[in-house]
Amino acid sequence: MKEIRFSVAPRATGHRANNKGTMRWNELSTPALTVDADVLERNLARMADYCRSRGLGLRPHTKTHKIPEVARMQIRHGAIGLTVAKVGEAEVMCGAGLDNILVAYPVMGREKLERLAALALDHSMLVSLDGETVAEALAGAARQHGATIGVLVEFDAGLGRCGLEPGPALVALARKIMQLPALKFRGLMCYPGQIGGDGEARKRDIVRVAEKVELALEAFRQEQIPVEIVSAGSTPSAFQSHQIPGLTEIRPGTYVYNDINTFYQGACSIEDCATRVVATVVSTAVAGGAIVDAGSKTLSSDPLRFGPASGYGYIVEAPDAPIVKLNEEHGYVDVRRASRALKVGDVVTIIPNHVCTCVNMHDEVFVLRNGEVEGSWRVAARGKIR
Ligand SMILES: Cc1ncc(COP(=O)(O)O)c(C=O)c1O
């Protein structure tokens, strides 16, 4: 194997790679997670252009990539800030010099609240929440640290996960936050994660979300409470966000890389999927099958949420050979109807069903340009679940 230094930052970060040796994607030791730099940059630019043209702020969710270098690229493309789910992810981003972070998750538990308050001492932090218990605990931690934390009150736009019904309860919680020390009510948040599926279903869902947003805003208008931020958005619905009046910003995450779920929702093409797992066929001993060295510890076991009923990833070189089952380190490929024979030693690329959980399995991602490895990024926030 040729020697290559992966500590060199790839050109995509603004640095120039100075590798002497070169390496093609199929020379990587497998399984390996790769990102095509050109596709990534195209995805970043497309979303940034859309938001700019529609007057929407872009606050991308970094849970998909978990990499400060990619977050920096998003900021360079005009993002107004970043979104994370966990305090640990916020710490990684702040530690890398990034700022304006929304923790889009109700943070509960003393230790986490203290870490969050410590971050808020020298970073602009926002937190979403949907109840007084979290609000009071957050205020307590912020006051103790002498920090101020911005709050978005979450309403349920139809997903049924977190968030109050839009209406008087939402206003009451906002009023409560205004009375609490060390917190600042900044606005509203919802996550319309139910928007997906085909065109007609999506149109109906968008109309329903728009109604929920309007109900929420009307409740605040009636009480004459100004709402500075209205944050929503997801990848499948991102390019229809302008059809939901009142939003000030969106938080798509998956769009950076895309995946097979995004593809089957009609929200991207296969060419827009920037991330692939490079895997090797390691066994063909059992008739009708082939085993690749990518199992649930490489791909994650998330099933397809949309599209065909089965499959744990899309083999680009053999789309008619589905991955029908996973063990931890084995991917079972059904080759009975495959138009291409898979031989032991063949190297293939797999687009994951759900790229966010797949990325969280990997220490690093190898960055490719025109099939050549330019360098690697550490997935610095992987496993940051607290
Ligand atoms: C609160 C919140 N905001 C934004 C996103 C990003 O959505 P997507 O993955 O569709 O880009 C998610 C995804 O889970 C989320 O939970």
Image (cartoon, rainbow, N blue to C red):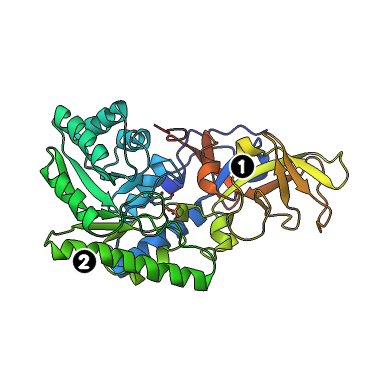
**Amino acid type at image mark 1:** Ser
Pointer 1: residues within 10 angstroms few (<14), some, or many (20+)?
many
How far apart in space, not on screen, are marks 2 and 1 (Cα)?
42 Å
* Percent coordinates x, y for residue 5 in the rendering: 53, 33
Left or right of 48, for residue 80: left
| Residue occupying the point 47% across, 52% down | 254
Residue sitting at the far front:
168
Is the residue at mark 2 in contact range of ligand 1, meaning its CB lies under 8 Å from it? no
Quarter of the image where the C terminus is located: top left
Mark 2, secondary structure of its residue: helix
Can you tell which mark lies on residue 301?
A: 1
| Residue occupying the point 55% across, 49% down | 354
Which residue is disc 2 drawn over? 218
Quarter of the image where the N terminus is located: top right
The answer to whether residue 205 is above or below residue 279 is below
- Nearest the viewer among 258 and 152 is 152
